[in-house]
Amino acid sequence: MILDDLDVPIALAPMAGGPSTPELTAAVAEAGGFGQLAAGYLSAADTAARIAATRAATGKPFGVNLFVPGPPTPPADLADYLAELGAEHQLGDPRFDTDDWDAKLDLLVADPVAAVSFTFGCPSAADIERLHAAGSEAWVTVTSVVEARVAVEAGADVLIAQGAEAGGHRATFTDRPADDTTDPLGLLALLQLLSAATDLPLVATGGLTTGAGIAAALAAGAAAAQLGTVFLRCPEAGTSQVHRAALTADTPTMLTRAFTGRRARGLRNRFLVRHTATAPTGYPEIHYATAPLRAEARAAGNPEEVNLWAGQTHELTPELPAGELVSTLAADTKAALEKALSRRIQHY
């Protein structure tokens, strides 16, 4: 197992849409963690180029993340919301695609990496077997015990346990507004439930930006911690300047479908406040529709109309090179674990 060979129990979250770069992935791998490239929104050709660039920067194992495609959304379900946005913004084409799923999966079978991780669903048992035959592990992101059971049945090697605290998109297999009335599981609760339900290794993700947070996840049953937000201010990350600047404030986060049609956690801003209540499920159609307005806001340095994905502890994010950050987190994790072990438990 990859997790058994890591020098540091830290994995880089695959942050699609800009922050993920070969340089960031390689830096985390070189520091002893597990780097992951985000292939979301990329073509198979672009994914291949980024894999090659990562290999040129490090000889260490790394992974690639894929988005599992869902069904298209009926245009009528999107019409009212697109009309609402179109009254104020120039919109893009609300098209559906599968994120080049078949071609990227074929690429990773022909040119395998150490692990392929999945978000938004679980690949079929046949697809996982193809990856296994190529020598890759399959890591499936889950948010519940029900999803974990599906992944176990399909042959997953590792479960990435995503708590509600996580920044960016919720990894739920199905995004249903009817489920919004149920509180999503926080990371520690999810780890405990998954540990009782399966023996598969768990990688914890969601709201982890300090060594103490990583230590808590390890104590709760995780084999490693996957961190994303904490790497957004690293110089190797492709994070936009407006996003970097916004992370330093203590702005609260919220869950929204307003920018992409799929529930995601980002910093509260004017766009989220105005449109979250009316945004329907419609991914990736709404993602493509809002792409021009988000690009315009980034170019203008306008934080009020751009998706500022961030976890709940974003204000603790430092500005450090990725390798130095991994080393600091590893040392702080060890110190936190030793401190916890030093506390006496009375009468036992």
Image (cartoon, rainbow, N blue to C red):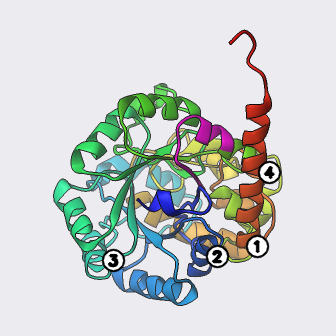
**Residue at 75% in and 13% down:** 346
- Mark 1 is surrounded, within 10 Å at the Cα level, by few (under 14), some (14 to 19) or many (20 or more) other residues, namely some
Nearer to us: label 3 or label 4: 3
Sequence-first disc among 1 and 2: 2
Q: Amino acid at mark 3?
A: Pro
Q: Do the residues bearing badges 1 and 2 touch, measured as CB atoms within 8 Å?
A: yes
For the residues marked 2 and 4, what is the alpha-carbon distance in whole angstroms?
21 Å
Magenta highlight range = 215-227
For the residues marked 3 and 4, what is the alpha-carbon distance in whole angstroms?
35 Å
Q: Amino acid at mark 2?
A: Ala
Q: Do the residues bearing badges 1 and 4 touch, measured as CB atoms within 8 Å?
A: no
Mark 4 — residue?
A: 316
Mark 3 — residue?
A: 112
Mark 2 — residue?
A: 27
The correct choice, above or below, for 304 with respect to 108 in the image is: above
For the residues marked 1 and 4, what is the alpha-carbon distance in whole angstroms?
15 Å
- Mark 4 is surrounded, within 10 Å at the Cα level, by few (under 14), some (14 to 19) or many (20 or more) other residues, namely some
Residue 30 lies, in percent from the top left, at: 62, 75
Sequence-first disc among 3 and 1: 3
Mark 1 — residue?
A: 321
Q: Do the residues bearing badges 3 and 1 touch, measured as CB atoms within 8 Å?
A: no
Query: Element at badge 3?
Result: loop
Q: Is residue 144 left or right of residue 58?
A: left
Question: Which is nearer the eye, 311 or 293?
Answer: 311
| Callout count | 4
